[in-house]
Image (tube, helix red, strand yellow):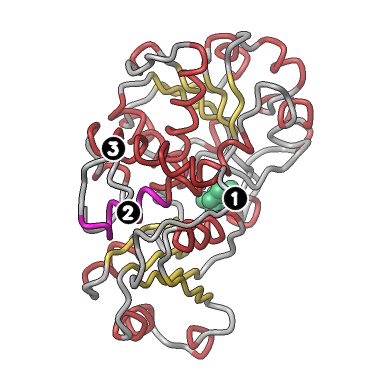
Amino acid sequence: MKHLLSAADLSRSEIDSICDLAEEMSEVQRREVKKLPTLRGRTVVNLFFEDSTRTRSSFEIAGKWLSADVINVSAKGSSVSKGESLRDTVQVIAAMGVDALVIRHSSSGAPAQAANWVDASVVNAGDGTHEHPTQALLDAFTMRRHFRLVDPGFADWSGKTVAITGDLTHSRVVRSNVLLLHTLGARVLLVAPPTLLPSGVDSWPAEVHTDFDEVIDQVDIAMMLRVQRERMSGGYFPTAREYTIGYGLTPERLARMRPEAAVMHPGPMNRGLEISAAAADAAASRVLDQVAAGVAVRMSVLYHLLGGANETGATA
Ligand code: NCD
């Protein structure tokens, strides 16, 4: 694996390999000394043109726990604010001898373009409304762990139903999740008001629903997505209250979920809008597990890109 640009690039065996190694990496997370020598001498640059808390810091922690040198460059405070082009910025950083560039950008396709301009490995850490493949990987890892609690031998996704509900139009998380879950073989339900369904959604490998109440009692995973007000220009729904009534994971809907079902949210959460505090903090909530998984999965991804091997288990 040279780059990670789209969830569509990953085969079933690559997804399993990344998740298996992430399982091993997560053991490092529980140690007092959280350091492996695996990527010593390698340099990872986080190049973030958009705001981020968890994605940027978890890439940083992941790189550091593998002993790579990790540098953070954000658009604010860099020459980007002086008008430098994406190509020049990417090439300047790559010219310093960087091994991996982790890029978040507001334009869909920016990381894929960057991959054409440099020799370094490029990881898409979220591009516009397009994709966020490491989020989908950490979500799959979190789901797999959840399913293995009930069935330790879990491997067949075809019996599992994942509902992804919320602002699908502006979400790169949904696009990567649909692609990855399709490869794994899960049944994916997309739930949103008609105004927040992306154009072309009918051709995605998923079922489209506009009534959350019709499906809530069928799901194994209720993944809630943030209402991305900063990407909205017009009125996509009448009021926040009406959105919550139709599409929020309210305490009433939480109570209708199957007993072994889980609640997920990639964050940041709008508590009280798409997810109630009761759901976010419920015993069924895997939200903080997702955050913890983010570090282990990104360690695994960096290893798959830079570690020079695809086999699992070789944690040096
Ligand atoms: C998401 C993102 O930035 O794409 N967050 C994340 O990476 N965990 C979703 C969002 O911004 O709502």
- Nearer the N terminus, badge 3 or badge 1? 3
Q: Which residue is mark 2?
A: 303
Q: Amino acid at mark 2?
A: Tyr
Q: Is residue 232 left or right of residue 310?
A: right
Q: Which residue is mark 3?
A: 17
Mark 3, ligand 1, within 8 Å: the answer is no
Q: In which image quadrant can residue 237 be found?
A: top right
In whole angstroms, how far apart are the C-alphas of marks 2 and 1?
Answer: 21 Å
Q: Would you say residue 43 sits in the magenta stretch?
A: no
Image: magenta residue range: 299-308
Q: Amino acid at mark 3?
A: Ser
- Nearer the N terminus, badge 2 or badge 3? 3
Residue 9 rendering spot, x and y as whole percentages: 24, 45
In whole angstroms, how far apart are the C-alphas of marks 3 and 1?
Answer: 26 Å
Kind of element beneath mark 3: helix
Residue 23 rendering spot, x and y as whole percentages: 42, 36
Q: Is residue 145 left or right of residue 54?
A: left
At label 2, counting other C-alpha atoms closer than 10 Å, the crowd grade (few under 14, some 14-19, many 20 or more) is: many
At label 1, counting other C-alpha atoms closer than 10 Å, the crowd grade (few under 14, some 14-19, many 20 or more) is: few
At label 3, counting other C-alpha atoms closer than 10 Å, the crowd grade (few under 14, some 14-19, many 20 or more) is: some
- Nearer the N terminus, badge 2 or badge 1? 1
Q: Which residue is mark 1?
A: 32
Q: Amino acid at mark 1?
A: Glu
